[in-house]
Image (cartoon, rainbow, N blue to C red):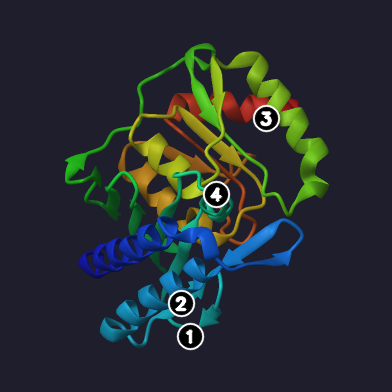
Amino acid sequence: MLYVAVRAARRAGDLLVRIFDNRSGLHVEEKKDRDYVTEADRKSEALIIREIHKHYPSHGIVAEESGSRNPDADVQWHIDPLDGTTNFIHGHPHFAVSIAAWKQGKPLLAVVHDPIRNETFEARNGNGAFLNRQRLRVGPEKKVSDAIFASGLPPYRREQLPVFQKRMEACMREASGYRRGGSAALDLAYVAAGRLDAYWEAGLSSWDVAAGILLVQEAGGIVTGLDGGRVNLKKGDVLAANPILNEEFRQILASAA
């Protein structure tokens, strides 16, 4: 299954790069306020779904653009064909393909592929996390004051801005620095790789985080909800870090509630 996911992600990534390099005529639609979709999203998603259904026709699909298929199947694939669409539209080369398979509420495998940097993050439950075949470990930082974190606010969730600002202010007062990438899948992958010490965000969709959750866990980190509880894919709140920083950031976020 992991081989199928990696192959699908890389083929979709090749497609995205071709469109990205010739995007002057790119057709962009606004699904809702500040939430965009392009022909690149749709073509990438169709390619991935074809690849998965060719090998696993009975599995379920939860995809950003085409919705859900076979919702009662034990195995559900969560697909984000282009995580970082706004970056893509603006020519900012930071986006990824994210594919994950979950079985009965638990992650089985994950792939996050960055086609611009040719970086493929992958994990299988119980077998570790890897970047281009090199094993990953979360960063060892123990102090929030020395940590850099990432976060964001989905642009179509402006109603959450007051709470987000309170949380950001609390974290920025304590941490060493803040990074805003614009791709939740890559933010989580970067935590797994030790490039970021922590990442938190609220109101995401399952396809944004389903792969990154397993990457962080298999790299020795912890992913919880913002309240420290178990991650709920339907709610979409995540806090990812090594075990010590996860607890430290959770307390900071709680103080801003």
Residues at marks 3 and 4, CA–CA distance in whole angstroms: 16 Å
- Residue 230: give its label: 4
The local crowd at label 4, few if under 14, some if 14 to 19, many if 20 or more residues have their Cα within 10 Å, is few
Among the 4 quarters of the image, the one containing residue 10: bottom left
Front residue (pair 47, 57): 47
Taking 230 as reference, is 53 left or right? left
| Side of 140 where 68 appears, left or right | right
Disc 2: which residue: 61
In which quadrant of the rendered image does the N terminus lie?
A: bottom left
Q: Position of residue 94 (x, y in %)?
A: 45, 44
As shown in the figure, which amino acid type bears the numbered disc 1?
Asn
Which residue occupies 55% across, 43% down?
Answer: 182
Which residue in the structure is indicated by mark 1?
Answer: 70
- The quadrant of the rendering that contains the C terminus is top right
| Disc 4 versus disc 2: nearer the observer | 2
Quarter residue 32 falls in: bottom right
Q: Which comes sooner in the sequence, label 3 or label 4? A: 4
